Image (spheres, rainbow, N blue to C red):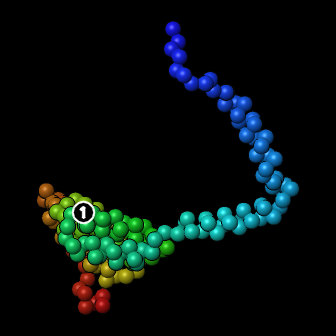
Amino acid sequence: SERPTGRQPRRPRRAETRQDLQASRQEVPSVRRCPALLAVGFVAALAGGADCRRSPDPAMLFAEAEALRAKQEKAASEQAIANYRIAMAAWTRRGDKRDAARAGQRIGATYEQLGSLRGSLQGYLAALSLAEGSGDRLIESEIRSDVGTTQARVADREEAYGEARGQCGHLEPAHLLG
Protein backbone atom coordinates (compact mmCIF):
# COMPACT_ATOMS: atom_id res chain seq x y z
CA SER A 1 0.00 0.00 0.00
CA GLU A 2 2.98 2.37 0.46
CA ARG A 3 4.57 3.49 -2.77
CA PRO A 4 8.34 3.66 -2.91
CA THR A 5 9.59 7.19 -3.51
CA GLY A 6 13.23 6.42 -4.14
CA ARG A 7 14.29 8.59 -1.17
CA GLN A 8 16.36 7.51 1.75
CA PRO A 9 14.53 7.50 5.08
CA ARG A 10 15.19 10.65 7.05
CA ARG A 11 16.73 10.51 10.52
CA PRO A 12 14.56 11.88 13.31
CA ARG A 13 14.85 15.62 13.92
CA ARG A 14 15.21 15.15 17.65
CA ALA A 15 18.56 13.42 17.21
CA GLU A 16 19.75 16.16 14.86
CA THR A 17 18.76 18.81 17.34
CA ARG A 18 20.66 17.13 20.18
CA GLN A 19 23.76 16.80 18.05
CA ASP A 20 23.51 20.39 16.89
CA LEU A 21 23.13 21.62 20.47
CA GLN A 22 26.11 19.61 21.65
CA ALA A 23 28.25 20.94 18.80
CA SER A 24 27.14 24.54 19.38
CA ARG A 25 27.92 24.33 23.09
CA GLN A 26 31.46 23.35 22.25
CA GLU A 27 31.94 26.13 19.68
CA VAL A 28 30.31 29.16 21.37
CA PRO A 29 31.87 30.53 24.58
CA SER A 30 29.52 30.82 27.51
CA VAL A 31 28.51 34.29 28.72
CA ARG A 32 29.40 33.20 32.24
CA ARG A 33 32.94 32.36 31.15
CA CYS A 34 33.31 35.53 29.10
CA PRO A 35 31.84 38.67 30.75
CA ALA A 36 33.40 40.85 28.06
CA LEU A 37 31.12 39.14 25.54
CA LEU A 38 28.10 40.16 27.59
CA ALA A 39 29.31 43.77 27.80
CA VAL A 40 29.94 43.98 24.05
CA GLY A 41 26.50 42.53 23.31
CA PHE A 42 24.83 44.98 25.66
CA VAL A 43 26.56 48.02 24.12
CA ALA A 44 25.76 46.80 20.60
CA ALA A 45 22.10 46.34 21.55
CA LEU A 46 21.93 49.87 22.95
CA ALA A 47 23.54 51.40 19.89
CA GLY A 48 21.38 49.42 17.49
CA GLY A 49 18.23 49.97 19.51
CA ALA A 50 18.59 53.74 19.43
CA ASP A 51 18.51 53.75 15.63
CA CYS A 52 15.45 51.49 15.55
CA ARG A 53 13.44 53.92 17.68
CA ARG A 54 14.20 57.00 15.63
CA SER A 55 11.26 58.18 13.65
CA PRO A 56 11.67 60.04 10.38
CA ASP A 57 12.18 63.77 10.66
CA PRO A 58 8.66 65.24 10.73
CA ALA A 59 9.76 68.46 9.03
CA MET A 60 11.16 66.44 6.13
CA LEU A 61 7.98 64.35 5.91
CA PHE A 62 5.89 67.51 5.97
CA ALA A 63 7.95 69.06 3.15
CA GLU A 64 7.63 65.87 1.08
CA ALA A 65 3.89 65.85 1.70
CA GLU A 66 3.60 69.46 0.55
CA ALA A 67 5.39 68.57 -2.71
CA LEU A 68 3.16 65.53 -3.22
CA ARG A 69 0.00 67.51 -2.53
CA ALA A 70 1.04 70.17 -5.04
CA LYS A 71 0.99 67.54 -7.81
CA GLN A 72 -2.82 67.38 -7.43
CA GLU A 73 -2.86 63.68 -8.35
CA LYS A 74 -4.90 61.16 -6.39
CA ALA A 75 -2.05 58.74 -5.59
CA ALA A 76 0.32 61.57 -4.67
CA SER A 77 -2.32 63.17 -2.45
CA GLU A 78 -2.96 59.87 -0.67
CA GLN A 79 0.78 59.52 -0.01
CA ALA A 80 0.83 63.13 1.18
CA ILE A 81 -1.90 62.30 3.72
CA ALA A 82 0.17 59.36 4.97
CA ASN A 83 3.23 61.60 5.36
CA TYR A 84 1.22 64.28 7.14
CA ARG A 85 -0.14 61.65 9.55
CA ILE A 86 3.34 60.38 10.41
CA ALA A 87 4.63 63.93 10.85
CA MET A 88 1.63 64.84 13.02
CA ALA A 89 2.20 61.78 15.24
CA ALA A 90 5.93 62.52 15.56
CA TRP A 91 5.33 66.16 16.49
CA THR A 92 2.64 65.12 18.96
CA ARG A 93 5.07 62.67 20.63
CA ARG A 94 7.60 65.52 20.90
CA GLY A 95 5.01 67.82 22.44
CA ASP A 96 5.00 70.19 19.45
CA LYS A 97 1.24 70.72 19.18
CA ARG A 98 1.52 73.70 16.86
CA ASP A 99 3.32 71.83 14.09
CA ALA A 100 1.19 68.74 14.71
CA ALA A 101 -1.91 70.92 14.27
CA ARG A 102 -0.48 72.34 11.04
CA ALA A 103 0.01 68.78 9.70
CA GLY A 104 -3.56 67.91 10.72
CA GLN A 105 -4.82 71.01 8.94
CA ARG A 106 -3.03 69.88 5.77
CA ILE A 107 -4.64 66.43 6.12
CA GLY A 108 -8.02 68.13 6.11
CA ALA A 109 -7.09 70.31 3.13
CA THR A 110 -5.80 67.32 1.17
CA TYR A 111 -8.96 65.31 1.79
CA GLU A 112 -10.92 68.35 0.67
CA GLN A 113 -8.80 68.50 -2.48
CA LEU A 114 -9.67 64.83 -3.09
CA GLY A 115 -13.38 65.59 -2.66
CA SER A 116 -13.79 63.77 0.65
CA LEU A 117 -15.50 66.32 2.86
CA ARG A 118 -16.03 63.86 5.73
CA GLY A 119 -12.32 62.94 5.70
CA SER A 120 -11.55 66.63 5.51
CA LEU A 121 -13.70 67.37 8.53
CA GLN A 122 -12.04 64.58 10.54
CA GLY A 123 -8.61 65.98 9.69
CA TYR A 124 -9.61 69.50 10.67
CA LEU A 125 -11.17 68.34 13.95
CA ALA A 126 -8.00 66.42 14.87
CA ALA A 127 -5.98 69.53 14.04
CA LEU A 128 -8.29 71.71 16.13
CA SER A 129 -7.83 69.59 19.24
CA LEU A 130 -4.06 69.99 18.87
CA ALA A 131 -4.28 73.69 18.06
CA GLU A 132 -6.36 74.38 21.17
CA GLY A 133 -3.50 73.07 23.30
CA SER A 134 -0.75 74.75 21.31
CA GLY A 135 -1.15 78.25 22.70
CA ASP A 136 -1.05 79.63 19.14
CA ARG A 137 -4.32 81.52 18.76
CA LEU A 138 -3.70 82.31 15.10
CA ILE A 139 -3.47 78.69 13.98
CA GLU A 140 -6.41 77.82 16.23
CA SER A 141 -8.43 80.56 14.53
CA GLU A 142 -7.45 79.36 11.06
CA ILE A 143 -8.41 75.79 11.87
CA ARG A 144 -11.72 76.84 13.47
CA SER A 145 -12.50 78.59 10.22
CA ASP A 146 -11.65 75.41 8.28
CA VAL A 147 -13.82 73.31 10.62
CA GLY A 148 -16.76 75.71 10.38
CA THR A 149 -16.58 75.95 6.61
CA THR A 150 -16.33 72.20 6.18
CA GLN A 151 -19.14 71.53 8.68
CA ALA A 152 -21.35 73.89 6.70
CA ARG A 153 -20.51 72.05 3.48
CA VAL A 154 -21.31 68.61 4.91
CA ALA A 155 -24.36 69.77 6.88
CA ASP A 156 -27.35 67.66 5.99
CA ARG A 157 -29.72 69.24 8.48
CA GLU A 158 -30.29 72.65 10.05
CA GLU A 159 -28.73 71.66 13.42
CA ALA A 160 -25.43 70.74 11.76
CA TYR A 161 -25.38 74.10 10.03
CA GLY A 162 -25.84 75.73 13.45
CA GLU A 163 -22.79 73.81 14.77
CA ALA A 164 -20.76 75.19 11.87
CA ARG A 165 -21.86 78.75 12.71
CA GLY A 166 -20.77 78.06 16.30
CA GLN A 167 -17.20 77.45 15.17
CA CYS A 168 -17.20 80.80 13.44
CA GLY A 169 -18.38 82.44 16.67
CA HIS A 170 -15.05 81.42 18.24
CA LEU A 171 -13.03 83.24 15.60
CA GLU A 172 -11.25 86.45 16.32
CA PRO A 173 -10.21 88.93 13.65
CA ALA A 174 -6.75 88.09 12.35
CA HIS A 175 -5.43 91.58 13.05
CA LEU A 176 -6.08 91.00 16.79
CA LEU A 177 -4.15 87.71 16.71
CA GLY A 178 -1.19 88.74 14.61
Residue 118 appears in view = yes
The answer to which of 47 and 96 lies nearer the viewer is 47
Local SS, label 1:
helix
16 left or right of 36 in image: left
* Outermost front residue: 6
* Percent x, y of residue 112: 20, 66
The structure residue drawn at horizontal position 25% and vertical position 72%, both measured from the top left corner, is 69
The residue sitting at 37% across, 82% down in the picture is 136
- Write down the residue under mark 1: 75
Q: Residue at x 13, y 56 (%)?
A: 156
Regarding residue 146, the answer to whether it shows in the image is: no
Name which quarter of the figure residue 58 lies in. bottom left
As rendered, which of 69 and 48 lies closer to the eye? 48
Horizontal arrangement in the rendering, residue 115 relative to residue 96 (left or right): left
In this view of the protein, which residue sits in the foreground, 3 or 73? 3
Is the residue 124 above or below the residue 13 in the image? below
- Crowding around mark 1 (Cα neighbors within 10 Å: few <14, some 14 to 19, many 20+) is few
In the image, taking residue 108 as reference, residue 49 lies left or right, namely right
Residue 157 location, quadrant: bottom left
Give 24 or 143, whichever is nearer the viewer.
Answer: 24
Give me the residue at 22% from left, 59% from top: 118
Q: Is residue 93 above or below residue 155?
A: below
Rendering coords of residue 37 (x, y %): 78, 61
> Residue 90: horizontal and vertical position, in percent?
45, 70
Amino acid type at mark 1: Ala
